[in-house]
Image: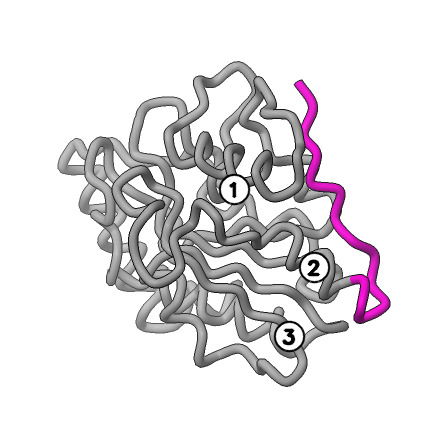
Amino acid sequence: MERFWANPAGLALLAFLRQRLQEGAVVYPPQPLRALSEGGPASVRVVIVGQDPYHGPGQAEGLAFSVAPGVRIPPSLRNIFKELHRDLGLPVPDSGSLMPWVEQGVLLLNTSLTVEDGQAGSHAGRGWEVLTDAVIDACNASGDGKVFMLWGAHAQRKLGAIDQSRHQVLCANHPSPLSAMRGPVPFLGCGHFSAANRWLAASGRPVVDWKLVG
């Protein structure tokens, strides 16, 4: 992490973020690196990759797609819950916190780790991709085989960094309402949660309990 902030991409990203904050931009989330502090790459079983954080007030919490308990569930997350129910028959939870997944070794990563209020994709191409590429590289190289779920075009740009002879890669459109039913692999109906557990079980690794309560 320290090496990233010392290299040209990291320095340019810091300068950009400082400038936008000085210009009065509202930037989310308050803890953009939270996903990277929840465990090392060797402990990861599943990597879920999205685009960028939620761009509404009080939503993004530094874990892709997750919101804190008590926060209204965003549309993308509602579609994730719909697919969980369709795929595994799990009840749709009232809480949008995905921490139970994180605690089981699921890394919830966006390709960009900050965004401006009301402006999806506003920090794409500003340097975060260099850091998230390095995270994917570390997950690819460390520990046992993993499942990578790449949701949307931004996430699928990471495909070339993953050794598919060691890992399972599952691609689908982003769960956003704008795209969840589109593309060659629509998100709704993709079956990624059951597919991940089948692959983990066949590889001798513990499966993920995808059930969320509350």
What element does badge 2 sit on? loop
User: Considering depth in this image, is 52 or 39 the residue closer to the camera?
Assistant: 52
Q: Are marks 1 and 3 in contact (CB under 8 Å)?
A: no
- Write down the residue under mark 2: 44
Q: The C terminus is located in which quarter?
A: top right
Q: Residues within 10 Å of mark 2 (few under 14, many from 20)?
A: many
Q: Nearer the viewer, residue 199 or 74?
A: 199
* Other-residue count near label 1 (Cα within 10 Å), few / some / many at <14 / 14–19 / ≥20: many
**Of residues 109 and 179, the one drawn nearer to the viewer in this rendering:** 179
Residue drawn at x 45%, y 30% is 78
Residue 132 screen position, x and y as percent: 45, 63
The magenta stretch spans which residues? 201-214
Checking the image for residue 20, the label placed there is: none
Q: Which residue is mark 3?
A: 167
Q: Is-magenta flag for residue 209?
A: yes
Task: Find disc 1 in the rendering and name its residue.
Answer: 63
Which comes before the other along the chain, label 3 or label 2? 2
